[in-house]
Amino acid sequence: MKATDLLEKQHREVKGLFKKVEKTENARERRQLMDKIAEALKMHTRIEEEVFYPAVRGIGTKKAEEMIAEALEEHHVVDLVLVELPKVDPEDERFEAKMTVLSELVEHHADEEEEEMFPVAEKKLGDEELEALGERMQAMMGESGSGRRRAA
């Protein structure tokens, strides 16, 4: 699977988890979904930062460098929210507020990658390179567990 296809699939999966949180009233289920989202986002950011972003940075254009810099800052903000979320009671109104902010940030990040970064990667790196990157990313996912429920 091409790296861009894998990342898009993960984006859809994590967006689906956020929708489930919105519809869930049960505190225990909300906490479980939050844990799944955190796990998915951590794996997603790891494979992006260790495999995909270096390849995009290697394109060597100012635009590629700017996209990577912004994406890394967005990952940093996601990490900050993920540190705070486990400390908030899922029945507390702050939980819903933090989940909304996290969801909006992730949605913006995913949309920007899909609309700006992925087309550049597909044009400049080509299918063969994207397939190789996708294989490396899938191998990393497999090393850290079963490889299921990864997203973002």
Image: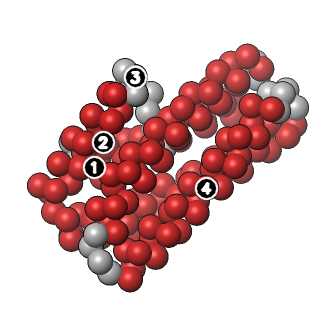
Residue at which label 4 appears: 76
Q: Which residue is mark 1?
A: 3
Answer above or below: position of 28 versus 4.
Answer: above
The CA distance from mark 2 to mark 1 is 7 Å
Lower position in the chain sequence, tag 2 or tag 3: 2
Choose the circle earlier in sequence order: 1 or 4: 1
Task: Specify how the rendered protein is coloured.
Answer: secondary structure
* Mark 1 or 3, nearer chain start: 1
Instruction: Tell me the residue at 25%/42% (across/down).
Output: 136
Give the residue type that dot 3 points to.
Gly
Residue farthest to the right, as pictured: 92
Give how far apart the Cα atoms at labels 4 and 3 are. 24 Å
Numbered mark located on residue 50 in the image: none
Identify whether 75 is placed above or below 142.
below
Q: Nearer the viewer, mark 1 or mark 4?
A: 4
Give the residue displayed 37% in from the left and 74% down from the top. 64
The residue that mark 3 highlights is 145
Disc 2 + disc 1, Cβ < 8 Å: yes
Q: Secondary structure at mark 3?
A: loop
Amino acid type, mark 2: Met
Q: Amino acid at mark 1?
A: Ala
Q: Which residue is mark 2?
A: 137
Q: CA distance from mark 2 to mark 3?
A: 13 Å
Q: Which residue is at the far bottom? A: 62
Tag 1–tag 3 contact (CB < 8 Å): no
